[in-house]
Image (tube, grey):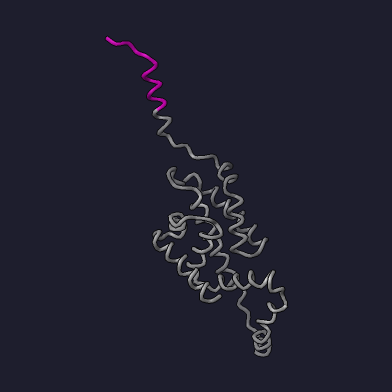
Amino acid sequence: MQGFTFRRTRGLNSMARDKLQLPLPFEKIMELHEREIMRYLLRVSGNREDAADLFQETWLRAYRAYPRLEPERDVRPWLYAIAVNLSRNRARDGARRTRVIVADGAAKLAANTKGEIYRSLNENDGYATVHMSELISALPARQREALHLRYFAGLNYGEIAEVMDCSPQSARANVSQAVRKLKSMW
C-alpha cells in the first residue's frame, strides 16, 4: 500500500496554476496601451480636446466591459475596436451638428477661396501634410479606418480584422484600396 505524499498534490496544483489564465490587472493594460490609443485618437480626430474626450470614454467603456472579456481574447484589438466605434460615433454626431445652411453668396465666396488657403502655407512644411489629411478624410469610412489602424496604429491584418469585424483578407483589401486611391489622388 502506498502512502499519501504531498508531491502528487503539488504536481496537480502547479498544473492547475499553469492552466489557469488570470487576466492582467486593468491598470497594467492601461499602462501598456494608453499611449498608442491616445496617438491613434489624436490622428483620427485631428483635435486634441476631442481626442482627450474619446480617450477617457474609451478607457471608461473598457473598464466597464473588462470583467466580461474572454480570457483568451487579445486586449489590443479589443481596445482599438472600442476607440474606433467611439470615433465613428463622434464623427457621425459631429456631421449631424455641423449641417449649416449657407447663403448663396457666402457659398460662392467659400467655393472660390477654398484652394487659396493652402497656397499661403510653406510648400515644404505644411502643404503635404494638410493635403494628405484631406485625401485620407475623403476615403470611404472602412478604407480610412483600415488605413489608420495599419499605418498609424501599427496593427497587423489579423488585428485589423478583429477590430473591424471582417476577415483578414478584407482588412488587407481595404488597406490596399485606400493606398491605391491615395496614390492616384496625390
Q: Residue at x 60, y 50 (%)?
A: 34
Q: Which residues are magenta?
A: 1-14
Magenta stretch: includes residue 11: yes
Is residue 12 covered in magenta?
Answer: yes
Residue 114 lies in quadrant: bottom right
Q: Is residue 13 above or below residue 55?
A: above
Q: How many marks?
A: 0
Indicate the position of residue 155 as horizontal and vertical percent values: 50, 55
Q: Is residue 55 left or right of residue 141?
A: right
Q: Nearer the viewer, residue 70 or 174?
A: 174
Q: Residue furthest front?
A: 124
- The relative height of residue 172 versus residue 117 in the rendered view (above or below) is above
Quarter of the rendering occupied by the N terminus: top left
Question: Which SS does the magenta portion mostly show?
Answer: helix
Image quarter in which the C terminus is found: bottom right
Depicted 103 relative to depicted 139: above or below: below
